[in-house]
Image: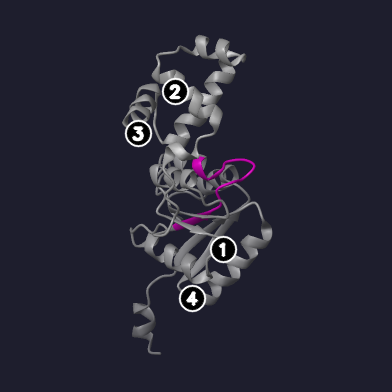
Amino acid sequence: MSSSSAQRRPAAISVAVIDKNPLVVRGLDQMLREDGRFELAMSAPDGEVFLSEYASRGVAAPIDVAVSGWVMPKGDGKSLLRRIGAMANPPKIVIYTGELSDMTLRAAVREGASALVHKSEPPERLLQAIAVAASGGRDFPAAARRQPPMEALTKREQELLSSLAGGATNNQLAEDLGVSVNTVKFHLRNLYEKLDVKNRAQAVAMFLSE
């Protein structure tokens, strides 16, 4: 290869891997090196460590794409997505997870991920997603399960939503269920997340539209 051809060779896509399992990190490191288009710039066991170490790198050493797990002991995938946008030169985020559900998929899309790949998929799918994300594109499962949000609710959550539609307050709900108001608030947060809504009015509107 001539020196001019070498100079025209595109720079490798810099990748960070964020996963609680060191075997996953090691395997992805080998896969990225073997592909040739990518280089592993750093790794971290969770989002908290990654954010701290990435901030210390400074803007002079940006990373193109971060491949992140979703369920981690500290700084999970959702938290990472919410916080990464405030950083200088944030990388694109590819969620690489064994937890594939409608709720996970909707949350990843809503929080700004560039792609989501299930760990059971062939390695080529992850490499494709990284390349797509690096180019500014988005890559999500075309065949992801599309269970209607209402069907994902537990019986207790369905009863809670019905009471909300009837105008019940948090105090009334707590009394009816025999739990504390804080417990009601906890159930409501889970309910809103499953329905992908932000508040009581939106949840009730979805319930009434069914």
Please report whichever mark, 3 or 1, sits nearer to the chain's N-terminal start. Answer: 1
Q: Amino acid at mark 1?
A: Ser
Residue drawn at (45%, 57%), measured in percent from left and top? 65
Q: Tell me the CA gap for discs 3 and 1.
A: 34 Å
Q: Which SS class for mark 3?
A: loop
Q: Which mark is residue 120?
A: 1
Q: Which residue is mark 4?
A: 36
- Residue 103 x, y percent position in the rendering: 48, 43
Q: Is residue 8 above or below residue 109?
A: below
Can you tell which of label 2 and label 4 is closer to the viewer?
2
* Quarter of image, res 150: top left
Q: CA distance from mark 4 to mark 1?
A: 23 Å
Q: Position of residue 11 (x, y in %)?
A: 40, 70
| Amino acid of disc 3 | Glu
Instruction: Name the residue that disc number 2 marks.
Output: 162
Query: Magenta span covers which residues?
Result: 65-78
